Image (cartoon, rainbow, N blue to C red):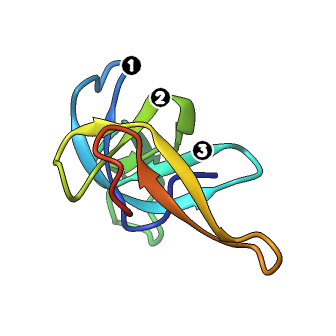
C-alpha cells in the first residue's frame, strides 16, 4: 500500500470529496485508510449505569484507499505515488511524487 500512517491526504470521491485530513491508521488487508475527522457516522451508545442517559457520538469510518490521493509535502499538490528502487539486491526503495519527482 502506498499510503502510510501520518500522511496528509485528500478524498477524491464520495460525500467528503475535496476534504483534507491526516491518516490515523492503515488497513492493508481491507485496502482502507482511517482519516482524522472525515467520513463520520453516528454511533448510538447504551447507558452503562442505571439513571444514566444514552448518547449519540460521531465516529470516523475507514475509506477505500482508491478514493484518496496523497498530498505531496514538497509541491503541496494531490499527486499519485511511485517507487524508486535504490538497491535491487537489498530491496531498498522509497516513495516519489509523480508530479514533482521528489522523494516523499
Q: Which image quadrant is residue 44 in?
A: top left
* Residue 69 vertical placement versus 73 (above, below): above
Query: Residue 31 has which mark?
Result: none
* Residue 58 vertical placement versus 52 (above, below): above
Label 3 or label 1, whichever comes before in sequence order: 1
Going 21% across and 40% down the picture, which residue do you hit? 77
70 left or right of 45 in image: left
SS for tag 2? helix
Q: Quadrant for the C terminus, please.
A: bottom left
SS for tag 1? loop
SS for tag 3? strand
Q: What residue is shown with label 3?
A: 32
Q: What residue is shown with label 1?
A: 13
Q: What residue is shown with label 2?
A: 67
Label 3 or label 2, whichever comes before in sequence order: 3
**Residue 42, percent across and down?**
38, 38
Q: Which residue is farthest left?
A: 76
Going 16% across and 47% down the picture, which residue do you hit? 76
Cα distance, mark 3 to mark 1? 14 Å
98 left or right of 21 in image: right
Amino acid at each position: 500500500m502506498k499510503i502510510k500512517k501520518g500522511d496528509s491526504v485528500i478524498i477524491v470521491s464520495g460525500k467528503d470529496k475535496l476534504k483534507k485530513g491526516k491518516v490515523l491508521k492503515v488497513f492493508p488487508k481491507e485496502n482502507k485508510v482511517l482519516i482524522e475527522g472525515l467520513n463520520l457516522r453516528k454511533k448510538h451508545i447504551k447507558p452503562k449505569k442505571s439513571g444514566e442517559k444514552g448518547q449519540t457520538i460521531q465516529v470516523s469510518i475507514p475509506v477505500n484507499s482508491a478514493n484518496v490521493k496523497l498530498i505531496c509535502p514538497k509541491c503541496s499538490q494531490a499527486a499519485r505515488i511511485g517507487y524508486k528502487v535504490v538497491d535491487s539486491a537489498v530491496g531498498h526503495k522509497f516513495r516519489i511524487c509523480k508530479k514533482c519527482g521528489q522523494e516523499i
